[in-house]
Image (tube, rainbow, N blue to C red):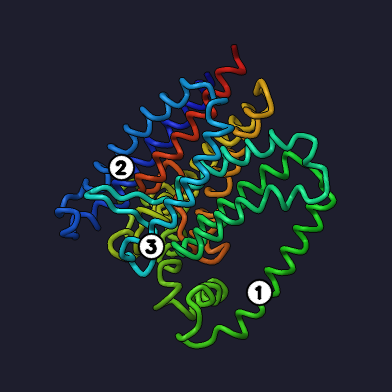
Amino acid sequence: MDYSLVVIIFFLMAIGLIMLYSASYYEASMKASCNYDPAFYLKKQLIWMIAGTVLMFLVAAIDYHHYIGKLSVLAYRVSLVLVAACLLFDPVNGARRWIRLGGFNFQPAEFSKIAIILFMTTLIVREGTGLYRRGAAIRLLAFPLLASAEIYFITENLSSAIIVFTVAFGMFFVARPDYGKFILLAMAGAALAAAAVWFIVHYATGESGNFRFRRVIAWLDPEGEASSKAFQTIQALYAIGSGGLFGKGLGRGMQKLGYIPEVQNDMIFSVICEELGIFGAVCVILMFVLLCWRLLRIAFTARDVAGSYLAVGVFCHIAIQVFLNIAVATNTIPNTGVTLPFISYGGTSILFTLAEMGIVLNVSRQAGE
């Protein structure tokens, strides 16, 4: 299999454990829910990483053709059921995103990401030359649109809804490179987004406005919303700006000391910038670039189209999620919660991301046989 990819994955997980402990030890030591244990988040993440690594190699040992077809259809249906099951549980911080069974918390939206990769691969392979027929886009993209809408309206998780649909759209783009139509669609989307921002600026006034509208206002004017919706963003920017070229030193960051909410999740990139500086941040970004390059390399060398689309789907997922996380941390786009793969805290996320890596490793192994 592609051992270069394996090395990159383990390197990113090692960085993740180091930065997670640095970012979370203060908060964990102050919270009763963490037993005042500074290594609380580190221990839980390490357990999930070990489980995920075992799962990755188990998945890598199974022929990837078994994951498409009937199994992918079942995975898609199960993902819809699991997201709907969130309605049976009490909301946390105003949103229903978790299924809680005993001491185990499961986020169905993370499973939806791998399910849509498998299901879209099946649809594209079955469609074949029919991809170029009229209505193919509607037939194929209706399924991820349904999954995204369910995630958004039930769990109120906009970032996961965007990722699920964008991954499917990226796979469809690769399968049908009709560049002219996609360029027109992109221009229409950009115009629609600009019109939406203009509408929000003139509509979302006062604290009574829609909270997603308020996030757009906070993105445009973070200083004006520094004490409310832009508080997390402002504190993250303070961390990024104070890191300089080489940072303050590992463990010496200040903004993680109670200033950045949930710093071990969505905003861990700001801690990397503060403690390791621009140099460290660029190194982490380059590791993700190498990871994406290996995924594309595997897609190009796969033995069949099914393997290619699986690798492309995983590439789209990783690339989109890394972009969204860093863009949010740097206030390039409005704040929406999304983890940094392999680095941010999150058991469900790391488990299914490593499962995706296992699928790609099997594709690479069969290509080399």
**Which mark is in front, 3 or 1?**
3
Q: Image point 41% across, 45% down: which residue?
A: 349
The three-letter code of the residue at mark 3 reads Leu
Quadrant in the rendering for residue 289? top right
Q: Which mark is residue 196?
A: 1
| Mark 2 lies on residue | 45
Quadrant in the rendering for residue 36? bottom left
Q: Point out residue 249 in the picture as x, y percentages from the top left corner.
A: 35, 47
Given residues 81 and 227, the one toward you in this image is 81
Q: Image point 47% across, 55% down: which residue?
A: 338
Check disc 1 and report its element: helix, strand or loop. Answer: helix
Of callouts 3 and 2, the N-terminal one? 2
Alpha carbon separation for disc pair 3 and 1 = 29 Å
Of callouts 2 and 1, the N-terminal one? 2
Q: Which mark is residue 143?
A: none
The three-letter code of the residue at mark 1 reads Ala
Instruction: For the residues labelled 3 and 2, say whether their Cβ atoms are less than 8 Å apart.
Output: no
- Total numbered labels: 3
**Which mark is in front, 3 or 2?**
3
| Mark 3 lies on residue | 87
Check disc 3 and report its element: helix, strand or loop. Answer: helix
